[in-house]
Image (cartoon, helix red, strand yellow):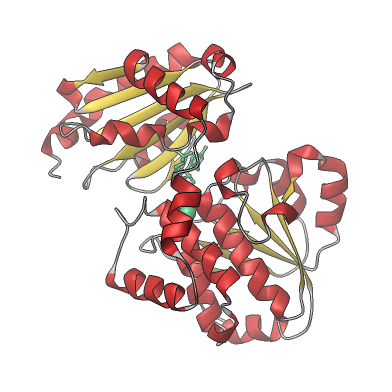
């Protein structure tokens, strides 16, 4: 980060700070936001975390989770509150589109803005950027940020638990985006008192019966494998959502099951939301899903995990995805795992 000295002087006196993260927040969005909040509060700042929509139930246990404000639940009041803040942190996204209406509020605000993120192709939306696509997660970068501020001693057990959770979920339990630096950092977090096994249980072994029934249903009835493209697809209709009494957060992770097949390089999860059709893409090896998400589905993300959406309904979205595949056939067939 350039001009760190300037940022340090801005943070030298107590401020009202808004931390925002992206729609459908995941473990890294919430983990990095709460970790940063708990750090900044120790420095005397007043901090509000606001996200556009609700987060998955398996994050409810996190320190500070009950104080996260969901913009959709009360746009008017929360909008007013946001406008009163004296500083903004954008975490785990890099285009204002990712926070919808909230972007229209924070965009024009004439206050210092800081972006901490690891997604490809950042847009110039902040005065200070801590950005690296090499980082496993925004939580990793928040730890870097705290170190840059020279305040590592303020990484309490609670801060460490939040950051650990973000790293854990964004690396799929240390299966991807790892590095020697990351493992050293995780060692530091454990030394701060994080119980890694407890957190693994809270995050990954906390499903309800309906979630496993849904998993059985999608793998049995809603999975299509296209061996000629080393691709597999799962679809979910609005009716499935109703029948299994599930909401958006309940489908987190479904797409990853497709990658468990040895010959599958590209996985897609396409599902109907109230107004849009959402697509989640995952890949193995050096095959990048970022371009497909951007070019065909107005989205983006990382090399091995991207997402996007369309307004053309489920069947047409599936068709559009399949029609894009020939363009990537050679790359898919040449991918080494
Ligand atoms: P997921 O498939 O879990 O929703 O998202 C996977 C990755 O793709 C995340 O890093 C997320 O930020 C990115 N992503 C998901 N949906 C969108 C989208 O609509 N637009 C953009 N730009 N990125 C997305
Ligand atoms: Mn992330």
Question: Could you say which is closer to the camera, residue 182 or residue 227?
Answer: 182
Task: Give the percent coordinates (x, y) of residue 192.
Answer: 49, 77
Question: Could you say which is closer to the camera, residue 1 or residue 216?
Answer: 216
For residue 40, side relative to residue 234 (left or right): right
Quadrant where the C terminus sits is top left
Task: Give the percent coordinates (x, y) of residue 141.
Answer: 48, 68
The part of the image, by quadrant, that contains residue 307 is top left
Question: Could you say which is closer to the camera, residue 83 or residue 176?
Answer: 176
Q: Is residue 323 above or below residue 125?
A: above
For residue 152, side relative to residue 269 (left or right): right
Task: Give the percent coordinates (x, y) of residue 196.
Answer: 43, 63
Residue at 48% over, 38% down: 299
Residue at 47% over, 58% down: 198
Residue 249 in view: yes
Residue at 32% over, 45% down: 304
For residue 263, side relative to residue 221 (left or right): left
Q: Is residue 38 above or below residue 154?
A: above
For residue 80, side relative to residue 330 (left or right): right
The part of the image, by quadrant, that contains residue 167 is bottom left
Residue at 51% over, 65% down: 163
Task: Give the percent coordinates (x, y) of residue 202.
Answer: 50, 50
Q: How many marks?
A: 0
Residue 278 in view: no
């Amino acid at each position: 980060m350039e001009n760190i000295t300037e940022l340090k002087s801005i943070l030298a006196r107590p401020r009202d700070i808004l931390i925002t993260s992206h729609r459908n927040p995941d473990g890294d969005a919430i983990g990095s936001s709460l970790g940063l909040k708990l750090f900044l509060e120790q420095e005397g700042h007043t901090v509000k975390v606001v996200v556009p929509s609700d987060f998955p139930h398996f994050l409810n246990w996190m320190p500070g989770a009950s104080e996260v404000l969901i913009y959709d639940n009360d746009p008017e009041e929360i909008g007013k509150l946001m406008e009163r803040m004296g500083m903004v942190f954008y975490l785990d996204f890099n285009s204002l589109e990712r926070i919808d209406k909230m972007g229209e509020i924070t965009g024009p605000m004439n206050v210092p803005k800081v972006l901490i993120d690891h997604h490809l192709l950042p847009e110039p939306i902040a005065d200070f950027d801590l950005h690296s696509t090499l980082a496993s997660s925004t939580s990793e970068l928040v730890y870097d940020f705290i170190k840059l501020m020279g305040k590592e001693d303020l990484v309490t057990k609670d801060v460490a638990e939040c950051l650990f959770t973000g790293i854990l979920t964004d690396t799929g339990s240390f299966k991807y985006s790892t590095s020697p630096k990351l493992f050293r950092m995780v060692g530091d977090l454990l030394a701060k008192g994080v119980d890694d096994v407890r957190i693994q249980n809270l995050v990954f072994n906390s499903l309800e019966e309906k979630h496993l029934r849904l998993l059985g249903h999608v793998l049995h009835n809603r999975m299509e494998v296209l061996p000629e493209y080393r691709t597999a697809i799962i679809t979910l209709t609005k009716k499935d959502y109703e029948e299994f009494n599930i909401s958006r957060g309940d489908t987190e992770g479904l797409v990853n099951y497709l990658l468990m097949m040895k010959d599958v390089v590209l996985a897609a999860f396409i599902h109907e939301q109230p107004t849009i059709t959402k697509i989640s893409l995952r890949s193995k090896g050096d095959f990048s899903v970022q371009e497909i998400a951007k070019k065909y589905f107005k989205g983006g993300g990382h090399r091995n995990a991207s997402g996007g959406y369309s307004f053309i309904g489920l069947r047409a979205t599936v068709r559009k995805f399949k029609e894009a595949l020939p363009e990537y056939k050679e790359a898919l067939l040449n991918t080494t795992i």
